[in-house]
């Protein structure tokens, strides 16, 4: 009896099973290594963020310094625009609008910021 016609499919099937087994082994083992590497990265990022936060002055103190500089140089349009964006970031849209208006008086405007600021202010107005 000639069994050569059965040998080729058997070799092919064995090769496919070996390939699939190897692929599964690689896929199953990689998540553990990726998790370990990713976990280390997250921990180092947390440490770096904590160090940066402890060294960085608060946004409020930076706004105070900017206001002091603008008191010395009231014609600094870029400074007024930065102050407007800072107040907006802190949630004080009325102060942001006043600072933006001053920047606009000095010839500097930002249409996208103006629209965003106007929308924020209109959301805060009482609804009838």
Image (cartoon, rainbow, N blue to C red):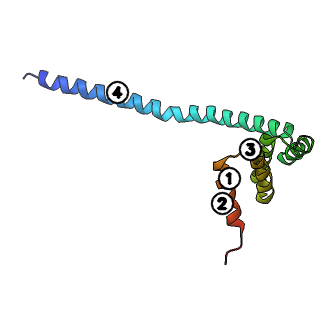
The quadrant in which the C terminus is found is: bottom right
Q: Nearer the viewer's eye, disc 4 or disc 1?
A: 1
Q: Is residue 20 above or below residue 64?
A: above
In front: label 2 or label 1: 1
- Residue 120, percent across and down? 69, 60
> At 38% across and 31% down in the image, what residue appears?
21
Question: Marks 4 and 3, Cα distance to the nearest angstrom?
Answer: 73 Å
Quarter-wise, where is residue 78 in the image? top right
Tell me, for residue 114, which label it has, or none: 1
Q: Is residue 113 above or below residue 35?
A: below
Q: Secondary structure at mark 2?
A: helix
Residue 107, which numbered label?
Answer: 3
Mark nearer the N terminus (4 vs 3): 4
Q: In terms of secondary structure, where does tag 3 sit?
A: loop
Give the alpha-carbon distance from disc 3 to disc 1, as whole Å.
Answer: 14 Å
Residues marked 4 and 2 touching at CB (< 8 Å): no
Nearest the camera: 95 or 36? 95
* Badge number at residue 119: 2
Q: How far separated are the C-alphas under marks 2 and 3?
A: 22 Å
Q: Sequence order check: which comes first, mark 2 or mark 3?
A: 3
Q: Are marks 2 and 3 in contact (CB under 8 Å)?
A: no
- CA–CA distance in space, label 4 to label 2: 63 Å
Q: Nearer the viewer, mark 4 or mark 2?
A: 2
**What residue is disc 4 on?**
18
Sequence-wise first label, 2 or 1: 1
Residue 47 x/y as whole percent: 77, 36
Numbered disc in front, either 3 or 1: 3
SS category of the residue bearing label 1: helix
Q: State which tag comes first along the sequence, 4 or 2.
A: 4
Disc 4 or 1, which lies upstream in sequence?
Answer: 4
């Amino acid at each position: 009896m000639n069994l050569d016609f059965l040998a080729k499919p058997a070799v092919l099937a064995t090769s496919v099973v070996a390939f699939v087994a190897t692929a599964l082994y690689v896929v199953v083992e990689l998540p553990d290594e990726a998790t370990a590497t990713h976990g280390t990265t997250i921990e180092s990022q947390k440490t770096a963020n904590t160090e940066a936060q402890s060294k960085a002055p608060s946004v409020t103190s930076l706004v105070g310094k900017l206001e002091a500089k603008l008191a010395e140089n009231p014609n600094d349009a870029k400074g007024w625009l930065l102050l407007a964006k800072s107040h907006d970031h802190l949630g004080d849209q009325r102060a942001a609008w006043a600072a933006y208006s001053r920047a606009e008086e000095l010839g500097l405007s930002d249409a996208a910021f103006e629209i965003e600021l106007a929308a924020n202010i209109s959301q805060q107005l009482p609804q009838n």
